[in-house]
Amino acid sequence: MAFETIKIPSASVGNQAHIHLHRFGPEGVKGVKKVYIQAGLHADEHPGLLVAQHLLRHLEQLDQQNALKAEIVLVPFANPVGLRQKNFGHLVGRCDWHTGQNFNRHMAIDPQQVEASLAPSFGIDAIENDRLMRLGLKHLVAQRHDDFEINSLHKILLSQSIDAHYVFDLHCDDVALPHVFYGLHQQEMGQTLAQCLGFTICLEEDVTGTVAFDGTHTQPWVNMQNHPTKPVFSTPCFAATLELRGRSDVDPKLAEQDCLGILDFLTHEHLIERIPSPKKPIALKPCRVDQVRMVKATASGIITYRSKLGETLKAGEAIADLVLVDHPKAKSIPILAPCNGYLFSQTGQFFITKGDTVAMLSTQEQHIQAGTQLAF
Ligand SMILES: [Zn+2]
């Protein structure tokens, strides 16, 4: 068990941010797997911060009981830069004030760099290839330029996570049912995770395109496996983004439930020796990310919902009403489901501007290009 504080190079003068890092279980032992868990990369999403504190308590106990068979790294607040972005009482934590960049984008490791520097080194030994891949990725992260504080933050987080075997990035949506993102190529493991968490909605990503923090870890492995030399690997990284419902779902009972779900998955993977919490299998709703339909407002006004989260809608059914506050007479227009789908996300805003996303439906049809992200 160890606790570290890592300084983030200062963007200006006299203003030093840092992250905290907790390490549990055997560290750096040959053959021992590494798990990396972080919360709050989007600094305005707080259910994960609470889940991390529940994990901290459980992991301390499990470590004392010698039950941890993997090294587990926990970063309980991954974005102190965003956490200080309070503007007149409101936390603006999704994008960096300095650069305008989304904290959960633009950190991918250049695929051409990975290919050029690593492809020639792989042989026929899958375990040795794993080792070379993890070492190589760590080296590429260490070489990164970090002109801006957001780049330094990404560099520090990736320096701790890029060689992990399992990565969990804890986020939340606006108002939503819990859901999980993972690579389409890791469907079986992703669905096992969803079962452990009790999350029915599984969003399966093509990680060869634009990636967030999770896909940054799996993309190099997928790209190398698609390389003409087809190197073999033993245990590529599994990464998932956990969307812990909506922004206001900060609740100790839910946090404990989600914490136990993560520990149950790690137990299933033989990384922890403990008895998993009893649960019944649930009917999952897997859907590719490009099959999620974002429903946009076609006018501005006040939104009120007719449909509830968890409802299956038919095309043309009303999701919500938009009250047009600037119309000469009192008037509202319905917002209709553009296709059949399962409503799993709504906006938490009441005043909506034309073009805003007001709902997300999981469907069985493709709506956007594969390999693109749902939100900017
Ligand atoms: Zn987020």
Image (cartoon, rainbow, N blue to C red):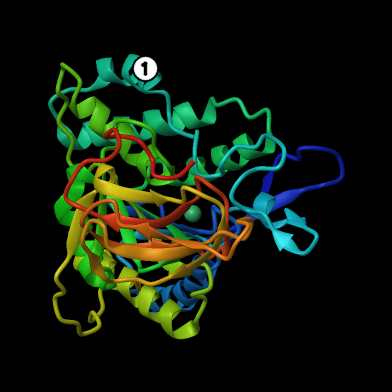
Q: Position of residue 120 (x, y in %)?
A: 26, 15
Q: Which residue is mark 1?
A: 112
Q: Residue extending furthest front? A: 329
Q: Is residue 49 left or right of residue 258?
A: right
Q: Is residue 132 visible?
A: yes
Badge 1 local density, few (<14 within 10 Å), some, or many (20+)?
A: few
Q: Amino acid at mark 1?
A: Gln
Disc 1 Cβ-to-ligand 1 distance below 8 Å: no
Q: Position of residue 133 (x, y in %)?
A: 31, 31
Measured along the vertical axis of the image, is residue 49 above or below residue 105?
Answer: below
Q: Is residue 24 left or right of residue 348?
A: left
Q: Position of residue 61 (x, y in %)?
A: 43, 80
Residue drawn 42% across and 80% down?
254
Measured along the vertical axis of the image, is residue 318 above or below residue 92?
Answer: below
Residue drawn 46% across and 28% down?
139
Q: Is residue 174 visible?
A: no
Residue drawn 57% across and 58% down?
301
Residue drawn 47% across and 77% down?
54
